[in-house]
Image (cartoon, rainbow, N blue to C red):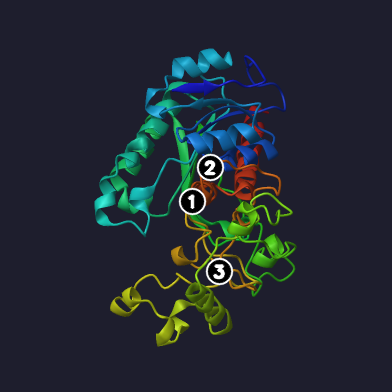
């Protein structure tokens, strides 16, 4: 249970033109990156996972990082460490773990103890009493987690916060990825509107900005080496983590066929269909699928570099995405650093992150409302 040192020492209350924020459940830092782009000073972050915390610290050395279970973190400690008093913080934002409320989750996972971490978000917001808070989660939370979501809403409203929430399509905000997310804003005695759409389906966009595509995000990258070639030091990728998993010949054949015949595993001939898919033909149809080059990608998940985990086949080459490609589709910058024991650990961090682009748009909306309220 540690707090990583930062370069900033004790913080002071927010100054004019410098809004302050704390990032709960920070992961590798997608939300913090967007907050900073929007002009917030992120003072502190909380992350339990060792690899994600290391990634966060590498990219945000100016932030005080509590590498610990959030349930053991006291508001008094945060305020003392940051040199703040209750009510002086501008924003508390967070993306609590949501495994129990996704559409891919088995019913038994609804009892996952991590689901209760939404209560920790509420606990810290009520204790720190920021001017605003932002929560991001899976679309199924209000329905599948209605009890916990109801607790969150009632707790915030009782404390004087006015709430706005909806399920938003992040492709509508310049993210080159179809990714529906529940987004909740709460302002202390003021209503903060949800962000306005910035990008549109090209079929209806007209003169407005079109959805960003896979080609827009990763089209400049050259064909990557495979992981085994990199490990053998036979070839070094031009960009860190731009290498692909080694795949079996049968997997390559599936991806080649899908790329040329509809991009879904449902198009595969019988000779390339797995036995488990024959037994359950209505199962997950995205696996061994191929992305479209000129459309947003499917949702990045923890399996985003594995062709057997979803529609993560490259549009032009019979291979799965590289970690760097997945990170770009999550709108991380090209030089963003990731740490992990293996490829799965890094893919999990990337897939779980809130895309930086959306975090920036959302944070700018909150900043504008806070600035208007202060006038």
Name the image quarter holding the C terminus: top right
Which of pointers 3 and 2 indicates the residue nearer the eye? 2
Q: Check whether the beta carbons of the residues at disc 3 and disc 2 lie within 8 A of each other.
A: no
Judge left or right: residue 54 versus residue 100. right
Q: Quadrant of the N terminus?
A: top left
Rendered view: 340 above or below 47: below
**How packed is label 1: few (under 14 Cα within 10 Å), some, or many (20 or more)?**
some
State yes or no: discs 2 and 1 in contact (Cβ < 8 Å).
yes
Q: What is the spatial separation of the Cα atoms under label 1 and label 3, in whole angstroms?
A: 16 Å
- SS type, badge 1: helix
Q: Which residue is mark 3?
A: 313
Can residue 41 be seen at all in this image of the molecule? Answer: yes
Gap in angstroms between the C-alphas marked 3 and 2: 23 Å
Depth order, front residue of 347/230? 230
Residue labelled with disc 2: 340
What residue did someone put label 1 on? 344
Residue at the image position 45 percent from the left and 63 percent from the top: 309
Residues at marks 2 and 1, CA–CA distance in whole angstroms: 8 Å
């Amino acid at each position: 249970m540690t707090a990583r040192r930062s370069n900033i020492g004790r913080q002071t209350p927010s100054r004019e033109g410098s809004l302050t924020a704390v990032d709960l459940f920070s992961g590798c830092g997608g939300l913090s990156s967007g907050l900073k782009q929007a002009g917030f000073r992120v003072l502190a972050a909380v992350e339990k996972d060792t690899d994600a915390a290391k990634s966060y610290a590498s990219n945000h050395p100016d932030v005080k990082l509590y590498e610990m279970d959030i349930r053991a973190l006291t508001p008094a400690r945060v305020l003392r460490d940051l040199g703040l008093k209750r009510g002086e913080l501008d924003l508390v934002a967070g993306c609590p773990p949501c495994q129990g409320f996704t559409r891919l989750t088995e019913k038994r996972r609804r009892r996952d103890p991590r689901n209760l971490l939404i209560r920790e978000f509420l606990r810290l917001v009520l204790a720190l009493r920021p001017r605003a808070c932002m929560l991001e989660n899976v679309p199924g939370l209000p329905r599948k987690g209605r009890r916990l979501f109801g607790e969150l809403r009632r707790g915030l409203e009782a404390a004087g916060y006015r709430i706005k929430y909806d399920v938003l399509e992040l492709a509508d905000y310049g993210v080159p990825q179809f990714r529906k997310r529940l987004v909740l804003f709460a302002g202390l005695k003021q209503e903060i509107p949800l962000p306005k759409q910035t990008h549109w389906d090209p079929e209806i966009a007209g003169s407005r900005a079109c959805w960003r595509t896979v080609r827009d995000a990763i089209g400049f990258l050259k064909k990557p080496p495979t992981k085994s070639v990199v490990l053998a030091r036979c070839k070094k990728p031009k960009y860190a983590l731009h290498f692909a998993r080694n795949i079996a010949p049968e997997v390559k054949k599936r991806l080649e066929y899908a790329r040329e015949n509809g991009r879904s595993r449902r198009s595969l001939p019988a000779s390339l269909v797995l036995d488990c898919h024959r037994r359950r033909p209505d199962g997950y149809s995205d696996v061994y699928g191929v992305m479209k080059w000129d459309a947003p990608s499917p949702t990045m998940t923890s399996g985003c570099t594995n062709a057997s985990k979803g529609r993560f086949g490259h549009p032009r080459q019979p291979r799965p995405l590289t970690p760097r490609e997945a990170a770009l589709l999550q709108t991380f910058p090209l030089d963003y650093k990731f740490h992990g024991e293996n490829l799965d650990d890094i893919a999990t961090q990337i897939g779980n992150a809130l895309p930086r682009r959306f975090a920036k748009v959302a944070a700018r909306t909150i900043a504008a409302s806070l600035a208007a309220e202060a006038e």
